[in-house]
């Protein structure tokens, strides 16, 4: 019995004189890259270089639009309208798309970042604005969203291909949302615990929330973060651990829907 799952990472988040993460090395371990588009992180030169590296390593490319909050790394919620949401998402997808086309590649997906991602997971209105922006840029793009969230549902209603995303290094609440980063138990720093969680999500379709509730979950793609202290080490360990559990790591765009099937 074989399981298949995509492995993605947020990257291209360096800007100016500041270097964040080890994108070149992490690209060797993943199948999809979510590249920052200049609002929460990244800059034009970083975008171009990250796109080029991803194409060289045959890693699928996604736009990673965030709130216009460089100092807060896009992780602080903002009171933005649905119109503003639509515009900022379309603007950032367009910017990254230009670099991808210029390098001879093709954009695979869109995954919102940070606070925008979490807000859209709960707000139907914001989720629909994001899904509409993605669809109007290119209806063939895939939308990545928190598994079972309003964002995934909005993408499905819009007619987009969607990927239910789960997290290797984050804990969950009883409603299936991620534990806010401001809480002390939000991050999973123990690699063995993180691997146990993602294997269970892929093979059993559930996760245990911080209050002990068992939450049903679908795992099409697994997110790892590239900006942590042990991010590279973790990125190297995960594919090996998944394969040892009979889970094949493969680009989501190469799989026939429904994606996560037992064979």
Image (cartoon, rainbow, N blue to C red):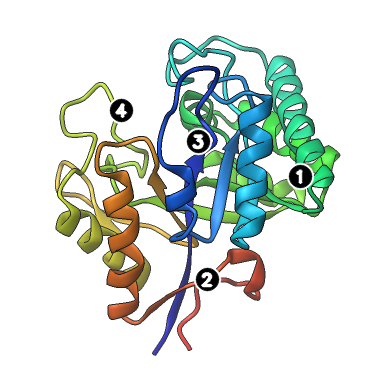
Q: Position of residue 174 (x, y in %)?
A: 27, 42
Of discs 4 and 2, which sits in the foreground? Answer: 2
In this view of the protein, can residue 148 be seen by the observer? no
N-terminal-most mark, 4 or 1? 1
Residue identified by numbered label 4: 180
Of discs 2 and 1, which sits in the foreground? Answer: 1
N-terminal-most mark, 2 or 1? 1
Q: Position of residue 201 (x, y in %)?
A: 33, 63
Of discs 3 and 4, which sits in the foreground? Answer: 4
Of discs 3 and 2, which sits in the foreground? Answer: 2
N-terminal-most mark, 3 or 4? 3
Examine the rendered structure and indicate whether residue 196 appears above or below residue 96. below
Left or right of 201? Residue 159 is right
Give the Cα distance between marks 4 and 1: 33 Å
User: Residue at point 36% right, 44% down?
Assistant: 176
User: Residue at point 55% right, 17% down?
Assistant: 16
Give the Cα distance between marks 3 and 4: 13 Å
Tell which of 11 and 217 is nearer to you: 11
Q: For mark 3, does the 10 Å Cα neighbourhood hold few (<14), some (14 to 19), or many (20 or more) residues? A: many
Residue identified by numbered label 1: 100
Residue identified by numbered label 3: 121
Q: Position of residue 111 (x, y in %)?
A: 59, 41
In this view of the protein, can residue 197 be seen by the observer? yes
Residue identified by numbered label 2: 250
Q: For mark 4, does the 10 Å Cα neighbourhood hold few (<14), some (14 to 19), or many (20 or more) residues? A: some
Q: Identify the disc placed on residue 160.
A: none
Of discs 3 and 1, which sits in the foreground? Answer: 1
Q: Secondary structure at mark 2?
A: loop
């Amino acid at each position: 019995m074989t399981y298949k799952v995509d492995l993605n990472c947020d990257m291209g988040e360096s800007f100016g004189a500041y270097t964040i993460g080890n994108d070149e090395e992490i690209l060797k371990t993943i199948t999809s890259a979510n590249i920052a588009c200049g609002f929460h992180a990244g800059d034009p030169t970083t975008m171009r270089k990250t796109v080029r590296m991803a194409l060289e390593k045959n890693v699928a490319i996604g736009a990673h639009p965030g709130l216009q909050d460089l100092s807060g790394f896009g992780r602080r919620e903002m009171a933005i309208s649905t119109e503003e949401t639509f515009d900022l998402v379309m603007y950032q997808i367009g910017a990254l798309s230009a670099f991808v086309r210029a390098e001879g590649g093709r954009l695979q997906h869109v995954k919102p970042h940070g606070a925008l991602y979490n807000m859209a997971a709960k707000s139907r209105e914001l989720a629909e604005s994001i899904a509409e922006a993605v669809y109007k840029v290119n209806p063939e793009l895939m939308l990545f969203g928190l598994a079972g969230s309003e964002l995934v549902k909005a993408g499905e209603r819009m007619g987009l291909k969607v990927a239910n995303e789960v997290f290797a290094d984050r804990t969950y609440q009883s409603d299936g949302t991620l534990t806010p980063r401001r809480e002390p138990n939000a991050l999973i720093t123990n690699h063995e615990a993180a691997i146990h969680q993602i294997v269970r999500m892929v093979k059993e379709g559930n996760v245990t929330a911080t209050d002990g509730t068992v939450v049903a979950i679908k795992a099409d793609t697994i997110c790892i973060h590239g900006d942590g202290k042990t991010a590279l080490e973790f990125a190297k360990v995960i594919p090996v651990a998944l394969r040892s559990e009979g889970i094949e790591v493969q680009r989501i765009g190469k799989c026939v829907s429904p994606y996560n099937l037992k064979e």
